[in-house]
Amino acid sequence: MDKWLKPGIAKGKRGASFVDSNVNTYQSNQAFDQVSSSPEGETIEKKTEITSGASCSGIGTEDTFVEQNQQNTVIPSTTDHTERQAGISSKKRKYDESYLSYGFIPIGNAENPDGKCVVCSKILLNSSLAPAKLKRHLDTNHPHLKNKNISFFERQRDVHQAGVTALQKYAKTDNENATKASFMLSYKIARAGKPHTIAEDFLKPCMTEVVACLLGEDSAKKVATVQCSNNIVSDRIHKISDHIEDELIDRLKESNAFAMQLDESTDVAGLAILLVFVRYPYRESIEEDLFLCAPLEANTTGEEIFKVIDEYMKKNKIDWNKCIDVCSDGAAAMIGKVKGTVSRIKTVAQNCTSSHCILHRHALAVKRVPSDLKQVLDQAVQIVNFVKTRPLQSRLFKKTCEDMKSQHQSLLHTEVRWLSRGRVLNRLYELRDELKVFLQTLPSPASASYLELLRDERWLMRLAYLADIFDKLNTVSSSLQGRMITIFTVSDKVSSLKEKIALWIECLGQKRCEAGFSAYAYTKNKFRSRLNAAPDLRIQLSDIKPDFDVILRKTMKRFHSSH
């Protein structure tokens, strides 16, 4: 008893036992490894050595045993143990067709799949793909099916696979249609020039409510799946633009020739923008598309413009020799003999010619106004700016128009461009009475001078003439713009305008009877040869305004509405 209570004895006993158990465990594992890895002839010798070593270890005192084992035993590292455990846990099982008799089918990886029950859809991991575990699941969760024939589970498998296929097809179709609808919506937004946020902020809520009202909530949920956020719409537009650009480049590479039209302008942000259009033959017709839209970051010289176009041509491997004509607006940067863009293009395109945009020629021609009419035009612009550039006066003039119940309540844009002069002058002439009333209320000297102009009948006659002639010119100018407008169409419209002007001049010098016969011939033509033109002609040529109340009392006994 005293021996056991001595210091260090219990500790030594415990330490010896602990080391002995570890050593024996390690020796057993080492023996197992040696047996499994050695040829059959060496197996018995290995076992004999381990056994004899273990027997000799037991001879002598416990301390001697511990010391010998501490000296001769190499403790295995934790790394070897971890690698051995990883090798055991990484074992993968394969699916066998006999597992279907337990109600399990393979899912996931084809070589090492997981198992899925066709009855309850529970998924067992690959490590559980053992007949005993699968049978235990069937007996525990579906005891009423344990005696079922394998044909029952085959039918369940077919139903399950058919449902999965239908679900995948349905989900794929809906997602594909929603994505296609997103592209179509983005295309319409870009074509209309609307902001990209209009889809999410306005169009999608409207479509959802309308579809929910007409087709029900299920259809509205499908509409709600269409992606149309600002970023999505912008991404869709870029992808559509890239597709169109690639298609255009392929067409230009296949075509034998093409013509260019280029112009440079400045946008609202002050950035210089270069636009280049091309016209080319495609499938027995002439097509027209935007070739290039690029910013000019530095100068807008002919050299910079040509450099941008040339880099784009080389990037897309388009042959310059296919360019047969270049149309420009006649600016110095475009048609300069030495550094102009057109001149530089002709150096790389040997067969290229140049032409002047006829629309710009028309614009330059109409800018030449006689001095007396030019003075009236400038004074009209001053009157418009006097009202529009001052917010207080603009509001007061609007109030005046509302009080007088005018058709219009404001003047048009303050800066009069050549294409909008007709509309601006027409609006000014139509609101001349309202302007007289409004200018009388203002004490400034400028308002008094403008009031005198509006009271001058000769000045108003010239204003009316300018409004009419610019309205006609604007109509023709607008018709000269647009897609697929050729030189033949433009030439015909300009020639027609010249003939109309000559006719108007001739009509100003005609007598009243001659004007009446002209109106008669216009009213009774070959399409209305049986018409009695006298009533129509009287209404056209008479300045007397009819009193419809008197006409109703004298001619109508009963009144009927449209059915």
Image (tube, rainbow, N blue to C red):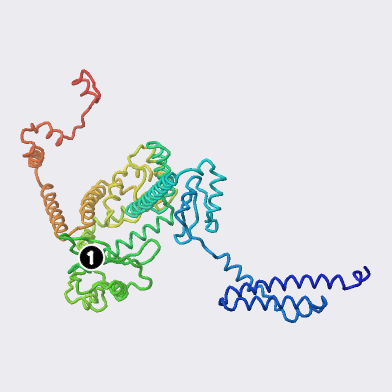
Task: Say if 235 sits above or below 170 in the image.
Answer: below
Against 13, residue 71 (above or below) is below
- The answer to whether residue 383 is seen in the rendering is no
Quick one: which residue is furthest to the top in this view? 557
Among the 4 quarters of the image, the one containing residue 363: bottom left
Question: As drawn, is 532 to the left or to the right of 149?
Answer: left
**In the depicted view, which residue is nearer to us: 129 or 407?**
129
SS at mark 1 in the image: helix
Residue 223: image quadrant is top left
* Residue drawn where x is 55% and y is 53% of the image: 132
Residue 562 position in % (x across, y down): 24, 26
Given the current orientation, which residue lies at the most extreme bottom position?
A: 71
Locate the N terminus and report the quarter of the image it occupies.
Answer: bottom right
> Which residue is pictured at 38% across the width and 66% down the height?
271
Q: In which quarter of the image is the C terminus?
A: top left
Q: From this viewpoint, is residue 17 visible?
A: yes
Residue toward you, 54 or 175 = 54
Residue 225 drawn above or below residue 282: above
Residue under numbered circle 1: 251
Residue 246, percent across and down? 29, 65
Q: Where is residue 101 in the image (x, y as percent from the top left)?
A: 47, 49
With 201 as the anchor, is 539 left or right in this view? left
Residue at image point 23% right, 50% down = 471
**Amino acid type at image mark 1:** Arg
Q: Position of residue 198 (x, y in %)?
A: 41, 50
Position of 85 compared to 379: left or right?
right
